[in-house]
Image (cartoon, rainbow, N blue to C red):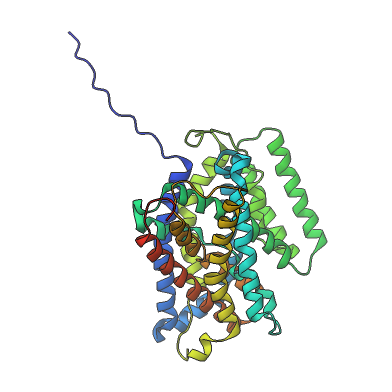
Amino acid sequence: MTRPRTLRPVRRPLSAARAFLAGEAAGGVVLIAATAAAMLIANLSLTSGPYAGLLHGHLGPLTVHRWIDDGLMALFFLLVGLEIKRDFVDGQLSHPRRRTLPFIVAAAGMAVPALVYLAIAGHVPGLARGWAIPAATDIAFAVGVLALLGPRVPPALKIFLTAVAIVDDMGAVAIIALAYTEAIDLGALAGAAGVLALMLACNRRGVRWLAPYMAGFVLLWWLLLLSGVHATIAGVATAMLVPITRSPGAPDDAGSPLHRLEHALGPWVAFGIVPLFALANAGIPLHGLSLATLGEPLVVAVGAGLFLGKQAGVFGSIWIADRMGIAKRPGGASWTQIYGLSLLAGIGFTMSLFIGGLAFPDDPPRVDAVKLGVLAGSLLSALGGFVVLRTAHRRVGM
């Protein structure tokens, strides 16, 4: 007599959104640790000299610092591009009616901080170039803070923050391409266009092997580096051409080239590239720091843009959209929780530091002032958002 088999529970893979949030939360913790390490290294007499020497040492045609900022960060932007495409084709933003509020909030959340920055620093010669520094949200840090709060934050609010940050990233990429590109080498740019055309042809012919797209990515990166357009744009441009298989209402399709590449890149970016970027860019020498330094227009403009501008833009746009009937606030969230989320949107870190380096190239004092403003604004936003969400009443309407 055969014995009945015991049925084992089937382990369902995480949805794309849940896996993304889990990975970003863990990556946010590593990013915080890397930032603390960078500050420590930059301020210890035994390590500050070798630290600066290593970053400015040459490795082939570029310095180590430029290999991190222009090279490895291109992989970060490749992942950002993959996430943007996935969300528009197969995620929260694939439904037109769900796009309305994230687009409104992201636009206001970029415009208001830029206006705050310009109101404070725009009159100082040379500082207007930094208007975009407080415009972007660092999703890894923000989701890391949300992870510490656990079930106190409605899942819809976490997903909404991710959607806003993805649209926010689109705006940041456009700003980098348009506002921080100066001299153009037309020959290299034409070559880059040819590479894009070849990758588009592969996409149209149904090529699902990732190798041609990755080879095109490397060649496109090099040509854009020569052209004068920031080389990291190669990551987003390549991502738009990587094929995707839609799997609505289900976890990622295992055979989808985009999903395979996204899951392969995710851990390397979250636990390697972004923390390495923080190590290379977040270290600020604090000796000689005074209240006068903290009151410099550039420091105040960046910090206020992130802390005041972001919360005003994000919360104000959600409130206006809800009151005017344009779009409803995220389900299950009280107004207090939405305000806490608006504060967390002021964590700018990775993208803010990146844009700061583009705005003031070869100007270390101003770059250090940007770092100080970014750290101050992001820290205030993180602490403020955490406290508000930690103490917020869960009932909708409060």
Residue 391 position within the rendered picture, expressed as x and y whole percent measured from the top left = 35, 62
The number of numbered discs placed on residues in the rendered structure image is 0
**Please, is residue 95 above or below residue 9 in the view?**
below
Residue 93 position within the rendered picture, expressed as x and y whole percent measured from the top left = 59, 44
Residue 241 image-quadrant placement: top right
Q: Quadrant of the N terminus?
A: top left
Q: Residue at x 59, y 58 (%)?
A: 317
**Please, is residue 308 above or below residue 90 in the view?**
below
Towards the viewer: 253 or 92:
92
Towards the viewer: 209 or 104:
104
Residue 6 position within the rendered picture, expressed as x and y whole percent measured from the top left = 23, 22
Q: Residue furthest right?
A: 186
Q: Residue at x 65, y 49 (%)?
A: 238
Q: Residue at x 66, y 76 (%)?
A: 118
Q: Is residue 271 left or right of residue 218?
A: left
**Please, is residue 121 above or below residue 159 in the view?**
below
Decide if residue 302 is in sight here: yes
Q: Residue furthest top?
A: 1
Residue 188 position within the rendered picture, expressed as x and y whole percent measured from the top left = 78, 59
Decide if residue 282 is in sight here: no
Q: Is residue 112 left or right of residue 29?
A: right
Q: Is residue 261 left or right of residue 237?
A: left
Q: Quadrant of the C terminus?
A: bottom left
Residue 393 image-quadrant placement: bottom left
Towards the viewer: 107 or 140:
107
Towards the viewer: 111 or 201:
111
